[in-house]
Amino acid sequence: MLAFIPLAVLGWATGALVNYLSDALPQTRRFSQPICRRCGRPQINLGYLAFPKRCSACGNGRGLRAWLVEAGYIAAAILTWLAPGNHVSFLAGWLLLAYLGVVTVIDIEHRVILHQMSLVGAVGGAALGGILHGVPRTLLGGVVGFAIMLLLYYLGIWVVRLRYRNVEGAPEEGLGFGDVNLSGIMGLILGWPAVIAGLTAAILSAGLASLIYLVIMLFKGRYSASLAIPYGPFLVLGIVYLLFFT
């Protein structure tokens, strides 16, 4: 049992880092002091990052997400150590999980995949993919992943314009370009031809989640043409599934 303590500390520290980056990057686009999302004041005390996770100025709590992320990474650290993936080392897998966590949280909360995160992902994904698959398969996977999602991106724009013509509040595009970049990163990480399986898993899971979400919103009478779910978490799901569960 004592052997799990360092893993729990690692998980907590990683979760705290993911929470910090998810708060700071969307507001400042750089490493900066944490900023309270309610009053906008910088936070310099450890209590905001660790406990009780409240703003020292206005007293606003950081919300349930901060606790869930840290708890999730503690569990992930222990599970990853007990049952490591077949494709990556513990260290490489853990760095990847930290990166994907930041991407996921920001996309869920802000509906955006930051260009800075895409750049980091491209460099790290190319390095990891090169080790796992070799340079040719890594680069081919990245090109294929980017190209397929780019095609879907423009197809989504065409479908949205056709379907919601003259509809007030309709979305302008079906996918964000950040999703295209993340698909390229997926391709670099998974390589060719595994990127096809990763994209398939992402598309199918996103379609199922969208259908469930649509039914719930219709049942509640809250459906509108602008309803949308972030696509990035499903691409992340495809990466994690292929690397850690196959």
Image: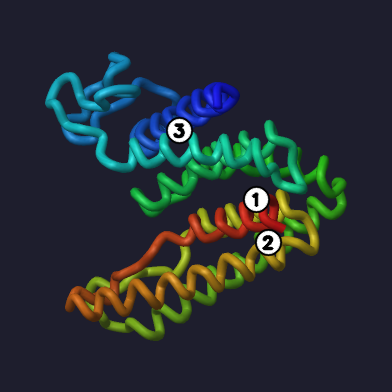
Marks 2 and 3: in contact by CB < 8 Å? no
Marks 2 and 1: in contact by CB < 8 Å? yes
Up-down: is 63 above or below 52?
below
Quadrant in which the C terminus appears: bottom right
Q: Amino acid at mark 2?
A: Gly
Up-down: is 228 above or below 46?
below
Expressed as whole percent of the image width and height from the top left, the position of residue 181 reads 59, 53
**View extreme (left): residue:** 58
Residue 107 lies left or right of residue 79; in this view the side is left
For marks 3 and 2 on the same chain, the one whose residue lies earlier in the sequence: 3
Neighbours of disc 3 within 10 Å: few (<14), some (14-19), many (20+): many
What label sits on residue 165 in the rendered view?
A: none
Expressed as whole percent of the image width and height from the top left, the position of residue 154 reads 53, 72
Q: Secondary structure at mark 1?
A: helix
Q: Read off the residue under disc 2.
A: 145
Q: Amino acid at mark 1?
A: Ile
